[in-house]
């Protein structure tokens, strides 16, 4: 951890992150927030023992980037927290939910541990020769939201987008939890290279940030970016519905993709913004391994997000299946952006 | 039964910790002071606080109340171990009483949340600290804080009508009342405001509120000479117009703000005065024009008036975080809050600015200067490589010089951040015999010295 000291001491402990950190808002403790994690990381560099509380609080960060955006002194608690997670694993403090994720991916190649074929969503669809673009469906769309994967590729295949021969988990769940994702990165990179693709299109914010951060040699775009300048070509009808948009943390705050999803939505139907949106958008509570490791905390963070949803809307639209899942589990009427587009194409 | 179990019986298992890493997170505030507690407890109501205090008093255990830990002088740092009361969960607004112009709140309420709740009623709570988005009202009251609008609206002292206090023996008292004024007995409210948790724990507060002004305007005046800017402050304040804020920023502060929010694009100059006027629509134009003329007459080379609500909000948001934003100027250096809160008489501002520049040269240390010049409160900001011990030594010597310079000019070592343990050594020089009276009060009310020991220079 000592190599992170210059980053850690950038924190002037002003406390600005206290009121934006979703875990701290729910749990209350100083240790459950970004400033606390920076302090614990500092402690790890100077002999603080990894207690049960340290491990739990380093792991209950959803990696939402709220602290990074809010920090006046330019510190990056998100990066430091990830380093602390790696350190704890190196010290032998890997937690049961981390081991479970590792084993799921090792045995099945997907984050859900689903032993069925990854391509079941594809059965009725033709696969064309691609023109340099490939669709990377991701684990959740492939196994839990097959209709979303089908809808996405139904739109994309007409635009000359291909598929990988053997897609596996992008590695984001491992990487966010501080675990080693290098084998998955190597596998998918080989697949992309063998396909001869120059651009990967994803429908998941987690996959998007993973490709951006950890892969090299090709471009990655989110579905909303890819479709934003093709809307006149693909959208066949307007929908008489009122929606709001939930900015996924790993697409919005992490990469500033705010306009493209809104452009797509506004081409199709009426958009009403949440009380907090774009760089102040609330986290869904699902990321960073929190849904798996700390489900009660995850659900409580979702409840906080729900308070932001305008009452009059028909659906919450989002561009990440993990956000979709957390919102849907909390009883919210939610649509993936791809499903919204498909409704306007059919 | 051990103490942990006894505390657990008061607040339930989920609201107490003695986990070493969790305690470590409570070992500092935003200052450089450190001290680790033995337990952190998160009470939810006055009865729980009272029970905890009784227990601490019985066993002579130090007890430190903490809001958001945004203090800049170590006030909430447990120097002697013991119990930290994390008050952040006592954060409700109990009552908004528009007819009587007051609210009742719990101490853990975030300052900005109160103003967000008051805005629909057309009211606000005027003390306006830079840490508005994160500090709690309990901490603000306990440190006699204020902020950018104190120049017109006063400090938090002027807004506290009544406090519910858990005294060092666990007794619960109310110090004031619902009335706007009272000549009844000792002013215990004033005694508690600014006592930094050394006399009791604030568990409720009844605060005066103020109607929002109809309109605000900001004058930005640029100077090539810091002292001319200092003289201008004095001239504005005696001109008959009372600005609602009068902020001074030097060139380093301007750079820091521009780095934090490049869209503001403040021009590069030696000193910038940001003067806000507020009031009725019919008078705002002439007030802003008078202030602008005053700035021009005293040497401002460029003066602008901003009316846009969005522009003003952005300006103030950036100004609020200028202190921490200085860290962005040099990636290898971090802002340390030390010697950062002196205040001097208005006429002494130009001299104080001159002295700060001399101290900067003497120690070869960049010192940014900004602050609420309208009430003589100057914040100085110094950034060092915090991993370099030698730089710490230089920093501490420079801070000592700044404190002594302010005292020589008839000023104070703290305008609004409090004494904590960072400035205790100057209390005797600043207060003389009055410090003995403070010590006597402390001994009378807290004979076992359990309430935030080793703070405010009382020991």
Image (cartoon, coloured by chain):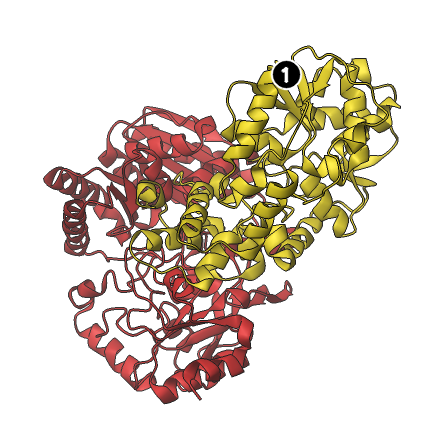
- Residue located beneath label 1 in the image: A195
Asked if residue A295 shows in the view, the reply is: yes
- On screen, residue A344 versus residue B355, left or right, reads right
Crowd band around label 1 with a 10 angstrom C-alpha radius: few (<14), some (14–19), many (20+): some
In the rendered image, the quadrant that contains the C terminus of chain B is bottom left
Left or right relative to B93: residue A228: right
The chain painted yellow is A
Picture coordinates of residue A133 (x, y %)? Answer: 66, 16
**What x and y, as percent, mark residue B238?**
33, 45
Residue A301 vertical placement versus B24 (above, below): above
A154 or B248: which is nearer to us?
A154
Residue B285 horizontal/vertical position (percent)? 51, 34
For the image, the number of numbered tags is: 1
- Measuring 79% from the left and 33% from the top, which residue is drawn there? A120
Drawn colour of chain B?
red
Q: Residue at x 85, y 22 (%)?
A: A345
């Amino acid at each position: 951890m000592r190599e992170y000291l210059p980053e850690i001491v950038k924190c002037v402990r002003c406390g600005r992150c206290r009121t934006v950190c979703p875990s701290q808002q729910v749990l209350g403790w100083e240790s459950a927030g970004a400033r606390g994690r920076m302090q614990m990381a500092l402690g790890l560099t100077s002999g603080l023992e990894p207690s049960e509380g340290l491990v739990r609080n380093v792991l209950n960060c959803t990696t939402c980037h709220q602290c990074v955006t809010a920090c006046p002194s330019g510190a990056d608690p998100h990066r430091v927290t990830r380093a602390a997670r790696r350190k704890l694993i190196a010290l032998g403090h890997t937690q049961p939910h981390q081991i479970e994720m590792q084993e799921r991916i090792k045995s099945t190649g997907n984050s859900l541990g689903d032993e069925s074929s990854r391509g079941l969503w594809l059965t009725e669809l033709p696969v064309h020769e691609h023109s340099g673009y490939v669709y990377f469906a991701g684990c959740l769309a492939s196994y839990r939201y097959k209709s979303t994967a089908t809808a996405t590729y139904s739109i994309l295949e007409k635009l000359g987008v291909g598929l990988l021969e053997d897609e596996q988990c992008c590695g984001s769940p491992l990487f966010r939890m501080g675990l080693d994702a290098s084998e998955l990165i190597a596998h998918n990179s080989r697949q992309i290279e063998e396909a001869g693709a120059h651009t990967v299109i994803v429908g998941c914010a987690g996959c998007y940030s993973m490709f951006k951060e950890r892969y090299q040699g090709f471009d990655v775009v989110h579905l909303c970016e890819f479709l934003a300048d093709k809307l006149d070509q693909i959208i066949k009808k307007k929908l008489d519905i009122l929606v709001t948009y939930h900015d996924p943390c790993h697409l919005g705050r992490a990469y500033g993709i705010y306009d493209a999803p809104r452009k797509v939505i506004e081409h199709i139907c009426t958009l009403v913004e949440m009380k907090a949106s774009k760089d102040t958008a609330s986290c869904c509570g699902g990321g960073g391994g929190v849904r798996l490791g700390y489900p009660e905390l995850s659900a409580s963070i979702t409840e906080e997000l729900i308070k932001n949803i305008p009452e009059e809307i028909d659906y919450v639209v989002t561009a990440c299946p993990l956000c979709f899942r957390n919102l849907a589990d909390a009883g919210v009427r939610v649509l993936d952006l791809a499903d919204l587009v498909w409704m306007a194409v059919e | 039964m051990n103490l942990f179990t006894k505390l657990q019986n008061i607040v339930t298992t989920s609201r107490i910790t003695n986990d070493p890493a969790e305690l470590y997170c409570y070992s500092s505030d935003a200052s450089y002071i450190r001290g680790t507690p033995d337990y952190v407890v998160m009470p939810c109501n006055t009865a729980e606080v009272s029970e905890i205090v009784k227990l601490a008093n019985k066993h002579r255990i130090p007890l430190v109340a903490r809001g958001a830990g945004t203090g800049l002088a170590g006030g909430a740092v447990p120097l002697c171990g013991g119990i930290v009361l994390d008050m952040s969960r006592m954060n409700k607004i109990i009552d908004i009483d528009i007819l009587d112009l007051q609210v009742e709140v719990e101490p853990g309420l975030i300052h900005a949340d109160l103003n967000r709740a008051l805005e629909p009623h057309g009211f606000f709570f005027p003390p306006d600290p830079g840490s508005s988005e994160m500090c709690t009202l309990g901490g603000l009251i306990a440190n006699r804080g204020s902020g950018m609008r104190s120049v017109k609206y006063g400090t938090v002292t002027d807004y506290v009508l009544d406090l519910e206090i858990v005294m060092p023996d666990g007794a619960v008292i109310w110090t004031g009342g619902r009335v706007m004024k009272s000549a009844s007995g000792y002013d215990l409210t004033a005694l508690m405001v600014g006592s930094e948790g050394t006399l009791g724990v604030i568990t409720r507060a009844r605060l005066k509120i103020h109607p929002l002004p109809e309109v605000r305007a900001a004058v930005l005046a640029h100077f090539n000479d810091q002292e001319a800017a200092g003289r201008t402050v004095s001239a504005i304040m005696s001109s008959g117009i009372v600005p609602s804020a009068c902020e001074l920023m030097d060139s380093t502060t301007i750079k820091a703000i521009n780095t934090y929010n490049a869209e503001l694009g403040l021009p590069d100059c030696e000193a910038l005065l940001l003067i806000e006027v507020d009031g009725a629509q019919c008078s705002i134009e002439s007030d802003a024009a008078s202030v602008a003329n005053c700035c021009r007459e005293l040497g401002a080379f460029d003066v602008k008036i901003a009316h846009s609500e969005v522009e003003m909000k952005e300006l103030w948001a950036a100004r609020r975080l200028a202190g921490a934003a200085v860290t962005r100027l040099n990636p290898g250096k971090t802002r340390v809050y030390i010697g950062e809160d002196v205040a001097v008489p208005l006429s002494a501002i130009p001299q104080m600015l001159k002295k700060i520049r001399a101290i900067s040269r003497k120690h070869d240390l960049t010192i940014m200067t900004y602050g609420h010049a309208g009430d003589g409160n100057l914040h100085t900001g110094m950034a060092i490589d915090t991993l370099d011990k030698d730089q710490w030594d230089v920093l501490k010597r420079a801070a000592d010089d700044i404190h002594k310079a302010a005292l020589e000019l008839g000023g104070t070592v703290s305008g609004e951040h409090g004494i904590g343990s960072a400035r205790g050594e100057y209390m005797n020089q600043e207060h003389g015999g009055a410090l003995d009276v403070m010590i006597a009060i402390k001994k009378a009310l807290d004979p076992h010295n359990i309430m935030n020991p080793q703070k405010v220079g009382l020991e």
